Amino acid sequence: MSTILSARDLEFLLFEWLHVEDLSARPRFAEHDRESYDALLGLCEEIATEHFAPHYRKSDTEEPVFDGEKVRLIPEIESALQKFAQADLMGLTIDEEHGGLQLPHAVASACMAWFTAANIGTAAYSFLTVANAGLLLAHGTPEQVERYVQPMLEGRFFGTMTLSEPHAGSSLGDVTTRAVPADDGTHRIFGSKMWISGGDHEMGDNIVHLVLAKLPDAPAGSRGISLFIVPKHLVGEDGSIGERNDVVLAGINHKLGSRGTVNTAPVFGSGAFSPGGAAGAVGYLVGEPHKGLSYMFHMMNAARLGVGMSATTTAYTAYLKSLDYARTRPQGRSLTAADPAGPQVPIIQHADVRRMLLAQKSYVEGALALNLYCSRLLDEQASAEDDAERLATGQLLDVLTPIAKSWPSQWGQESCSLAIQVLGGSGYTRDHDLEAHWRDQRLNPIHEGTHGIQALDLLGRKILGGGGVALMALAGRIEQTVARAGDLGGEPAAYADALKAAVDRLGEVTMGLAGLGDPDRMLANATVYLEAAGHVVIAWMWLEQLVAVGERTGDFYDGKRAAARYFFRWELPKVAPQLDLLASGDTTTLEMREDWF
């Protein structure tokens, strides 16, 4: 049994629950079937196991090195990424006309899960490149697609997302990077960025930076941001690699986790190089001026779902490794053992160890279900037969995205912590991977919009800003599940009642927050709202899985029932005091003065 990911769980979620093969009836996915899905998933498991997982520890301990000119990575990273590209995995969901496989997002997400579980530090380079290519396919010109996207899909170019600046962080409206129009229709880019993953290395032939910058006539704030392609090396019309662009590094950041992915501080237009004999880094406008942030959010939303999946799979492999340890580590005896000198038992026989393993199982399998459900919504949206279906699916996806990003990031951290605890003293040593997974996991509540930003997005923009329509769409879907579970009777029906009560209470509290009138009071406790709503959604995912299990028996299905039972008895009740706090309109954080700290 793999300690990277569970192929059986993926099979259940994709085919016994989500019925992904039914998507083949839609024209977009007509070229695929269950056989092709199984073959591809098997291939991904093989490549991840043989080429990504083996250097996980090495890529963590032997971090990227910057010598002032070049970034050096361990060679295994590039070798693994070449295997990935050679298997045509860069274009899993890309349209066939652009050389992609045009797979359903649900299957592609399951494929990518193997790589993020096996080695998130190495997988991140391909993840960023695919997201970069997807943005350019959506908003770039045919010439830009030919010049930059095709080499990325072939694995020859890599891509980045270059947003943040040292002084601005997540406040993108405050970026100061400048884009000065040049006589030849290009722009010259000047400015410094920070925390840019994959921002420089020697892999491949080129790095394609997507850079947020402001034109001279830009409106203030986020409305004045434009998006530019700024390659490390200029590319000729024939696709040949030209002179070095004026993109250099001020340095690299030394991260807590995911160390194999170099994190950089790039500088554009420093004068280190003079492409074309002029000052500034050469940049090419993507789409229309001042619409860069909306284009980047095309990439950001996909990235947020990707971070959620990375958080899930990091916790998943930690869970499987702690499970494997618990089954093989003898220590102690049964509390009722008659002979104190008798043989020790595997620690999985101790109830408290089973508690920690069961908590992990409920977190990671619930989160994986949510990740794949959101991917299935992307497929429905992309292949919708009419605007009404597309709109309804989009509303549901909008409200689920911040939860799908943040819940696995927060509870995946708790899951990794429990995995360490299962190993006891061995857990905090570098002899085992779990402490590294815990460090990797800690990045996810920060990546691609912090936990707090996702909370403001969920409550402020997606729910209150939309008049509650998105929340009603979510409640409607949950009620459908509640009805199906109620028909099954027994435990599923009892859990359906508990979930219905939680959803109703969430709706009441939301209406109360909307009635406060004052935005500061409405959003002061948005993070608590995100966490409560997240638990409700994961409970829904477990009820969905229970319905899919039905009356089937066997270790796998019985394990699903036990994990659902744990979540409904131990986790869902945590929502009640959170909702009570929100309903009270508590202003403790607002009233706290800076000088009191």
Image (cartoon, grey):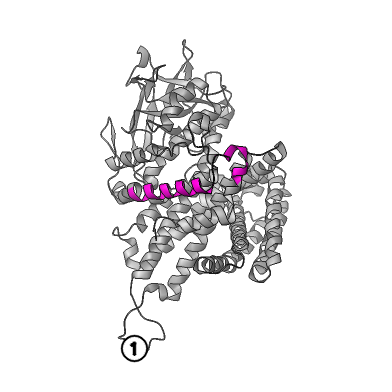
Q: Quadrant of residue 564?
A: bottom right
| Secondary structure, magenta segment, majority class | helix
Q: Residue furthest bottom?
A: 338
| Residue denoted by label 1 | 339
Structural crowding at the residue carrying mark 1, measured as other residues with C-alpha within 10 Å and reported as few (<14), some (14–19) or many (≥20): few
State which region is magenta.
Answer: 23-50
| Quadrant of image for the N terminus | bottom left
Residue 125: percent from the left, percent from the top?
40, 39
What type is the residue that disc 1 sits on? Asp
Can I make out residue 457 in this image? no
Residue 137: percent from the left, percent from the top?
52, 29
Front residue of this view, candidates 362 and 166: 362
Q: Is residue 481 left or right of residue 271?
A: right
Q: Is residue 209 left or right of residue 370?
A: left
Q: Is residue 434 magenta?
A: no
Could you say whether the residue bearing mark 1 is in a helix, strand or loop? loop
The relative height of residue 524 versus residue 273 in the rendered view (above or below) is below
**Residue at the spot 48% in from the left edge and 25% down from the top edge:** 145
Can I make out residue 474 in this image? yes
Q: Is residue 438 left or right of residue 142?
A: left
**Residue at the spot 33% in from the left edge and 61% down from the top edge:** 428
Q: Is residue 25 magenta?
A: yes
Front residue of this view, candidates 240 and 405: 240
Front residue of this view, candidates 469 and 179: 469
Total numbered labels placed on residues in the image: 1
Q: Quadrant of residue 221?
A: top right
The relative height of residue 218 versus residue 467 in the rendered view (above or below) is above
Residue 112: percent from the left, percent from the top?
45, 46
Q: Residue furthest left?
A: 67
Residue 470: percent from the left, percent from the top?
68, 46
